Image (cartoon, rainbow, N blue to C red):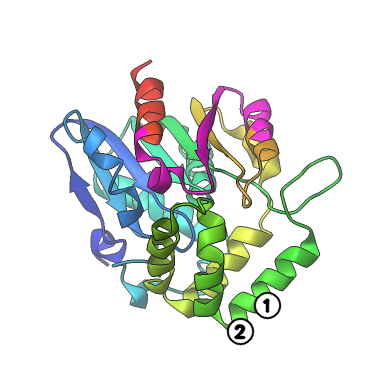
Amino acid sequence: MDLLRRNNVKVLGRGTRPLVFAHGFGCDLNAWRDVIPSFEDDHRVVLFDHVGSGGSDLSAYVSGKYASYDGYVDDVLEVLDALDLTEVAFVGHSAAANMGLLAAIRQPERFSSLVLVAPSPCFIDDGDYRGGFTREDIEGLLEVLDSNFLGWSRAMAPTIMGNDDRPELGDTLSASFCRTDPDIAREFARVVFLSDHRADVPRCRTRSLVLQTQQDMIAPVEVGHFMHRHLPDSELVLMTATGHCPHMSAPSETSEAIRRFLDR
């Protein structure tokens, strides 16, 4: 199988330092379009789509493989291997932050650093841990998603984006949802919203930056503090941006935070 075609891999930039961007649920590689110009001069920028998203090869999707994050982590590592990348700086948004964390645990020698944008190892409240949702909330969300994915996407995109004064951002995210295969998205949603990787966070020894926004209804600020407390080598940046997709709503602030971290 052509792994680069499978994941619609794009390689840009004029530098040699590998910088890999991975998108979250419902998005595709275009989510990073306003961030990557800041890094093209001095990095080898790699973008890709998860199978089922964007321009990926839908025929490569196998439910059993992608029933957990493990299948997606396999893909990430296979793409890095196919490109012969080492000392990788990996930038993952939301679900892809978990993928990067798990990949760095599995092959720590492959990664130099992680940038975790609006990460959440668990979306469900549990005792003192606040993930943002009750289990009943998540079950209800998945039921609606199952019955009407496109309707759910149109209704949820503005809330996820979290910038009510800029409705065009919600429209952009909704259009991205519509480019995702609905059947695959339903299965991916279960992986994302029902997984619990809190116990894995302390196992990641790779230097990490946690980018946490204000008023994120998907990953509340408490989650950012949890990640920072439990990642052994981490920095936390509380952004002025709001919502769950700062790379789309505040690309300059996002780029500057990533740049400061990578250059230290």
Please name the residue that numbered disc 2 is placed on.
147
Is residue 117 depicted above or below 206 in this figure?
below
The amino acid at mark 2 is Ser
Query: Is 241 within the magenta?
Result: yes
Q: Quick check: 165 left or right of 16?
A: right
**Percent of width and height locating residue 201:** 63, 37
Which residue occupies the extreme bottom position in the image? Answer: 147
Q: Residue at x 64, y 60 (%)?
A: 193
Q: Residue at x 25, y 58 (%)?
A: 4
**Percent of width and height locating residue 18:** 27, 35
Is residue 117 depicted above or below 195 in this figure?
above
Q: Quadrant of the N terminus?
A: bottom left
**Percent of width and height locating residue 28:** 36, 60
Q: Which stretch is magenta?
A: 225-252
Q: Which mark is residue 207?
A: none
Which residue occupies the extreme top position in the image? Answer: 264
The amino acid at mark 1 is Glu
Q: Quick check: 175 left or right of 101?
A: left
Query: Is 165 within the magenta?
Result: no
Cβ atoms at labels 2 and 1 below 8 Å apart: yes
Q: Residue at x 54, y 51 (%)?
A: 162
Query: Splitting the image into 4 quarters, where does residue 205 fall?
Result: top right
Between 127 and 162, the one lying in front of the other is 162
- Crowding around mark 1 (Cα neighbors within 10 Å: few <14, some 14 to 19, many 20+) is few
Which residue occupies the extreme right position in the image? Answer: 127
Between 74 and 193, the one lying in front of the other is 193
Q: Secondary structure at mark 1?
A: helix
- Crowding around mark 2 (Cα neighbors within 10 Å: few <14, some 14 to 19, many 20+) is few
Please name the residue that numbered disc 1 is placed on.
143
Whether residue 57 is visible to the viewer of this picture, yes or no, is yes
